[in-house]
Image (tube, helix red, strand yellow):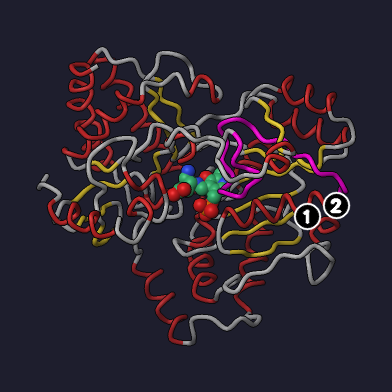
Amino acid sequence: MKRPVRSRKLFERARQILPGGVDSPVRAFQAVGGVPLFVRRGRGASIEDVDGNRFIDYVMSWGPLIHGHAPPGLVRAVAAAARLGTSFGAPTVLEHELGERVRALMPSIERVRFVSSGTEAAMSAVRVARAFTRREKIVKFAGCYHGHGDAFLVKAGSGATTLGVPTSPGVPAPVAADTLLARYNDLGSVETLFEAHPGRIAAVIVEPIAGNMGVVAPSDGFLQGLRALATRHGSVLIFDEVISGFRASAGGAQAIFGVTPDLTCLGKIIGGGFPVGAYGGRAEIMELVAPAGPVYQAGTLSGNPVAMTAGLWALKRLTPGLYKELARRGSMLAAGLAGAARAAGVRLQVNAFGSVLTPFFTNVPVRDYDSALSANTGAYATFFRAMLARGIYAPPSQFEAWFLSAAHTDRHVQQTIRAAQAAMKEVARET
Ligand code: KE4
């Protein structure tokens, strides 16, 4: 790997105008050390940085790129759309075409509203759930992340945990007080909250397959239990499927586990790499959203025709064969990482679900936020740097998911495993 000379210069300049030199905290490499690499281009499963280094990419823009970087067909489709106009602020046929495709894949979504990010989707879903139930409190799970809306920055995962600020300054105390915290995979912790706040919980919001404390799958009966509790107490069950939607399966986690949420939040893959989020669900709830109803939510670039084109392109290619291959390679990589750690005598738990996975540097099975936090972040940082030096670009945080795409081949995975075998020896030496 060539020294990141140009990235270093660009980073110094970026820090003069962008807080921390980035537009999203996890990109700054603070948890893993070194200079964040400035990317020049991406193609298929790979990215190239401004110093000419090439990497197999497992960040994949944090999940949207299930078909890989810049698939030629997608680039052609968005170029053609842009030539017709990049934004109108007026209805286009593309929006309800994509909405109908979302409903076909996730029948619980009887009505959907497009926005420009997963954060907007989650914020809006909670607002309409509060309006529908006329209640104010929400339940979230420690370690889950639902974007940076005030209500969610309480024991939040992803970058908030990575930077050691899971509860952010600047969130007004009354707002934080309305966010009740439960433990992932612990139904009792949710029942306790319902008993303590009878008739006051508007919604339970959960990542049905958690990705933001690292990957943590729901234990048997967990999601079904949440469904029963929400129904019993008249609360809205919100599945935040920004990661798992169209990723875990074409119908998301709700299709896999057979649990029907009242509302679903979507993002990432739905935009094919362009800024798209969405929230939707039961018509009687969603019909409260303006202008059909009184709950206000709006957006200049919501339903943008270029982004809708990219989303349609991406969702039209979610075939059963795609998921089979993604799952096969995901488990190949998971097994390879585990094998590399075992051979080097490094304590590792690999949580994998289809094409997402997280290697946790701990010997404790990771089932929730506390067990995720037992991971040795220093060991992860050593591993990250050793992999980078060998041409593998992993998420620069222990508390994130690795993403595979249709562009990742067996050769890519085998190359990654070979790099991991060497990297784990460095971890063993250094920790
Ligand atoms: P965005 O606002 O970043 O589009 O979506 C927020 C969001 C909501 N819900 C879930 C389950 C999410 O994972 C996210 C965003 N995910 C992070 C990665 N873990 C985005 C990466 C970043 O923050 O830079």
Are discs 1 and 2 less than 8 Å apart at CB? yes
Instruction: Label 1: state its secondary structure.
Output: helix
Q: What type is the residue that disc 2 sits on?
A: Phe
Q: Residues within 10 Å of mark 1 (few under 14, many from 20)?
A: many
The residue tagged 1 is: 128
User: Residue 100: where, in percent of width, then height?
Assistant: 67, 66
Q: Which residue is painted at 33% across and 46% down in the image? A: 28
Q: What type is the residue that disc 1 sits on?
A: Val
Is residue 148 a member of the stretch shown in magenta? yes
Residue 368 visible here: yes
Q: Which residue is painted at 88% across and 30% down in the image? A: 198
Q: Give the extent of the magenta segment.
A: 132-154
Which image quadrant for residue 184? top right
Is residue 104 a member of the stretch shown in magenta? no
User: Residue 305: where, in percent of width, then height?
Assistant: 54, 76
Label drawn at residue 276: none
Label 1 – label 2 distance at C-alpha: 6 Å
Q: Residues within 10 Å of mark 2 (few under 14, many from 20)?
A: some
Closest to the observer: 176 or 41?
Answer: 176
The residue tagged 2 is: 132
Lateral position of residue 216 relative to residue 425, left or right: right
Instruction: Label 2: state its secondary structure.
Output: helix
User: Residue 106: where, in percent of width, then height?
Assistant: 67, 52
From what the image shows, is residue 128 above or below residue 29?
A: below
The extreme left residue here reads: 2
Closest to the observer: 383 or 225?
Answer: 383
From what the image shows, is residue 105 above or below residue 233?
A: below
Lateral position of residue 145 relative to residue 48, left or right: right
Q: Which residue is painted at 82% across and 28% down in the image? A: 194
Query: Total marks drawn?
Result: 2
